[in-house]
Image: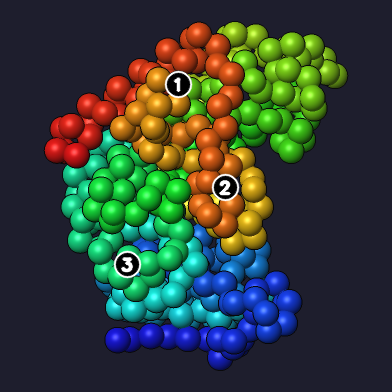
Amino acid sequence: MTTSTSPQGTGDATAGGQGGAARTTKLAIVGAGAVGSTLAYAALMRGAARTVALLDVNRAKVEAEVLDLQHGIQFMPMARVEGSDDVAVCAGADVVVVTAGAKQKPGQTRLDLAEGTIGLMRTILPGLVEVAPDAVYVMVTNPVDIVTYAALKFSGLPPTQLFGSGTVLDSSRLRFLVAQHCGVAVQNVHAYIAGEHGDSEIPLWSSATIGGVPLLEWPGLGGRGPLTGEVRDDIAREVVQSAYRIIEGKGATNYAVGLAGTRIIEAVLDDEHRILPVSTLLDGAYGLDDVCLSLPTLVDRRGAAERVEVPLADAELAGLRSSAESLRAVARRFGL
């Protein structure tokens, strides 16, 4: 095994600086590409875990990423960084984030990526579960809903312990665009994208609020108009298309997804009981089952602990069911 470790920090340091009672938190990231390395950087900068381990089949790449991160440890919350092409580097992880997969090309949909990535999950998951059986697994690889569904089958893990990053990033894009139109801070916008992380995703306008005001009743401030149906349609379209625009311009999305992934990690490691729209296996919610898609879900140390059933307008429920059927069709196509 080849492992690079940081001289900074020690393995017996405790989470949150509480002294000897708490165990060190460890985050393992599978894949040291644009998303995996950015997620490692974001997690380190936010102090999400005391140990961050990178796993990648490209030994030279993972060692270079680890070394680069180690050189910046002085400017971050204290942490240990390690990496390897051997799965043993993930041993004992509290959270395992899987970013490895086929790279999305300009003009290619997330679902086009499915076949190669599903095969990769079949190969890598048994080894990961063997070395980190108690970890919470977060799938970030696209198409995340199909990959999460396949990973549950290949790993044998319960849906609380393995779930996808879902529409956490999409919801952030939605909130940013709403805030930009309304002239308010993005932190004052509360709105979710549900369904597929992809072309059939659904904005939940009926439950969205801005500063406590229902979004559909927002009057507009400072000469900015309300969120009319036309404006909402434009925003929803931009949420879907923005990833394609970024990929066309620079080859990959990495910063926002790295931050979104770190937010999920923190919710787990810090036992935050935070509601996030992650992708989980449905078991009857809204009349849907046997499909992974995103709905607001309570995320804490247990993982995707409990789904929150948000009231849906008729059009939103119809869109959610259509999104589910689209995902089921893809799963059937790959024999899942």
Residue at x-position 49% and y-position 10%: 315
Marks 3/1: CA–CA distance? 33 Å
* Amino acid beneath label 3: Leu
* Amino acid beneath label 1: Tyr
167 left or right of 300 in image: left
Residue 290 seen in the current view: yes
* Amino acid beneath label 2: Val
Sequence-wise, which precedes: disc 3 or disc 2? 3
Residue 244 seen in the current view: no
Check the picture and name the quadrant holding the N terminus. Answer: bottom left
331 left or right of 166 in image: left
Residue 61 appears in which quarter of the rendering? bottom left
Residue 6 place in picture, x, y as percent: 53, 86
Q: Which residue is mark 1?
A: 286
Marks 3/2: CA–CA distance? 22 Å
Q: Is residue 295 above or below residue 18?
A: above
Which element type, helix, strand or loop, lies under badge 2? Answer: strand
Badge 3: how crowded within 10 Å, few (<14), some, or many (20+)? many
Sequence-wise, which precedes: disc 3 or disc 1? 3
Q: Which residue is mark 3?
A: 128
Residue 226 appears in which quarter of the rendering? top right
Q: Is residue 65 above or below residue 152?
A: below
**Which mark identifies residue 299?**
2
> Which of the two marks, 3 or 1, is nearer to us in this view?
1
Residue 260 place in picture, x, y as percent: 55, 49
Q: Nearer the viewer, residue 172 or 314?
A: 314
